[in-house]
Image (cartoon, grey):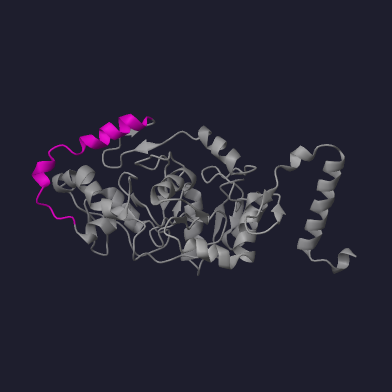
Amino acid sequence: MSLFYTNREVRMINDRKRKKEMSDAGVAEELGLMYSCDFCTDEYDSETELHVHRKVKHREQVANILTEDTSCKLCISQHKDFEELLKHTKSTHLLSSEDAEHVHREIFICDVCNLMYFNKKMLEIHMQYMHDPKNKYKLSETCPKCNKQIQIKHVWFHFQRHMIQSIASCQICLKKCRNRADLRDHLKIHPSYYHCTLCGYESKVKDSFTVHMQAHNSNLHESGNIAIDESMLRKCFAPRKNAKKSTCNIGIKGLCLKDLFVCVLCRGLCKEDEKAAHIAKYHLVDIVATKKQYMCVCGEQFFNNVLLKHHVFKLKGEHKACDS
């Protein structure tokens, strides 16, 4: 009869047989928890399967949740107010503490579509797959999980083998955890990362980093007449409003924030109406004091080399730093 089944159906049948055998052997606890749908009585073995089920089978309910101002657009969850939504975003999606003022992890941002990654190799693969379509059938890359050489055109299927697409996978080391509760425990092995891109200062202690960033605020009165325009905010924060949207669906999807903005210079977290105040508090003095200008061949100038690198970070492209 297997002749008339698809490969997917054969795998599902084999999985059911394996789980039944394990259950009969008295080791049902190894199967993990069952996850119930909020909208119906269906149950699934993994949170990822449940997440997909909700988006496919309950599109109308999901659409209603997404229209609410206090809903998380990333994992389709409801929150009582905006502050709770911010706490959820920082802890669940930015892998930081609920009261974080800066992202506690090293992040890598696509300069084309603004998707964020916590693994540099994932960003490189994303850019080759999504933003270099002419060459993606020729290029190969090292898998960040198993270190094997893989063709970019086959990367989706390769990542399926590693279950990297699971919502319970660690976005830093790509380890697959049983569920998101286990993932939160797993993240504790990845130490917090505080790095000032203005002067190179690093710390693993939040309070020390906060004091250091406040030191950049000295002599603020000397720069009081400098205007903070939209152009400056566009260079310093991600995601940008005019960024090209991506429909990337390979491996772990890049993070695209809706309600928070990340400062490219210090990974500071700001709401829309806090961006100018953040620049004035931490970076305006450095903008005024810096005489050297970093320029791209396209003619755009930056006061900080980090901003220039963020601007030209494309594996294949015409943008690059001027030699001078």
Q: Is residue 12 left or right of residue 64?
A: right
Residue 207: say if magenta: yes
Along the line of sight, the residue nearer the viewer: 54 or 232 = 54
Q: Is residue 62 above or below residue 196?
A: below
**Picture coordinates of residue 254, whole percent (x, y):** 48, 55
Q: Residue at x 43, y 55 (%)?
A: 70
Q: Which residues are magenta?
A: 205-228
Q: Is residue 322 visible?
A: no
Q: Can the viewer see residue 49 in this picture?
A: yes
> What residue is shown at x 26% (from left), y 42% (from top)?
198
Query: In the image, is 103 to the left or to the right of 152?
Result: left
In the rendered image, residue 127, in percent from the top left (x then y), is placed at 47, 59
Which residue is outermost to the front? 80
In the image, residue 256 sits, relative to residue 34, either above or below, namely below
Farthest residue to the right: give it.
Answer: 1
Number of marks in the image? 0
Q: Is residue 208 above or below residue 66?
A: above
Q: Quadrant of the C terminus?
A: bottom left
Q: Is residue 310 left or right of residue 174?
A: left
- Residue 231: x and y, percent? 23, 61
**Residue nearer the viewer, 216 or 46:** 46
The front one of 223 and 96 is 96
Task: Please say whether residue 282 is one of the residues in the magenta stretch.
Answer: no
Q: Position of residue 136 (x, y in %)?
A: 53, 65
Q: Residue at x 58, y 50 (%)?
A: 167
Horizontally, is 146 left or right of 93 in the view? right
Looking at the rendered image, the quarter that the N terminus falls into is bottom right
